[in-house]
Amino acid sequence: MVNKSFLKQTMKNEEIAMLESQAQESHIQSSSDVEEHNAGFEAMFKKLDNSKKWFLSTGKCVDNELFVFGSQCSADHPSRSLIIDPHDENYAQYKIFTPEELEEIKEYQKKPMPFPTK
């Protein structure tokens, strides 16, 4: 929101009204862009078979958490394709998964690294 008391010292009322109008139009446009950005993602998510979703030992559904997080991302993120990188710090920063849950994700069906042949 524009701080009118500060701007009145240097701008005319018409200029203030124009800035407020532009800010409101920008917000409406960005909301529309976000809705459009999420439409395909939401449609894809609704097609998922609930019986095939991944549940952690805590009862948390990984697919659902990725969907909620991905819906809030303003830019593309792997979560919008239901791809999880357990090393992505965003999941801990935004408390999507606990450190214990991220460790469980890292260890799930972990394959040992083969040693190089000589």
Image (cartoon, rainbow, N blue to C red):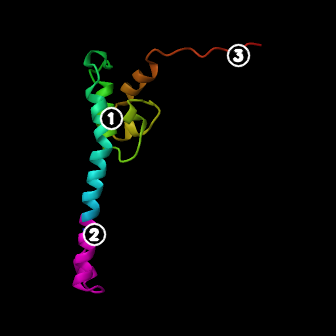
Q: What residue is disc 2 on?
A: 22
User: Which circle, 2 or 3, is nearer the viewer?
Assistant: 2
Q: Quadrant of residue 28?
A: bottom left
The one nearer the camera, 91 or 22, is 22
Q: What residue is disc 1 on?
A: 96
Which contiguous range is marked in magenta? 3-24
Quadrant where the C terminus lies?
top right
Q: Quadrant of residue 1?
A: bottom left
Residue located at (36% from left, 25% from top): 101
Residue located at (28% from left, 69% from top): 22
Q: At label 1, which amino acid type do we have?
A: Ile
Q: At label 3, which amino acid type do we have?
A: Pro
Q: Is residue 60 visible?
A: yes
Q: Is residue 47 above or below residue 36?
A: above
Q: CA distance from mark 2 to mark 1?
A: 34 Å
Q: At label 2, which amino acid type do we have?
A: Gln
Task: Please identify the dominant SS of the magenta region.
Answer: helix
- Where residue 18 appears, as percent x and y from the top left, is 25, 76
Q: What residue is disc 3 on?
A: 116
- 5 drawn magenta: yes
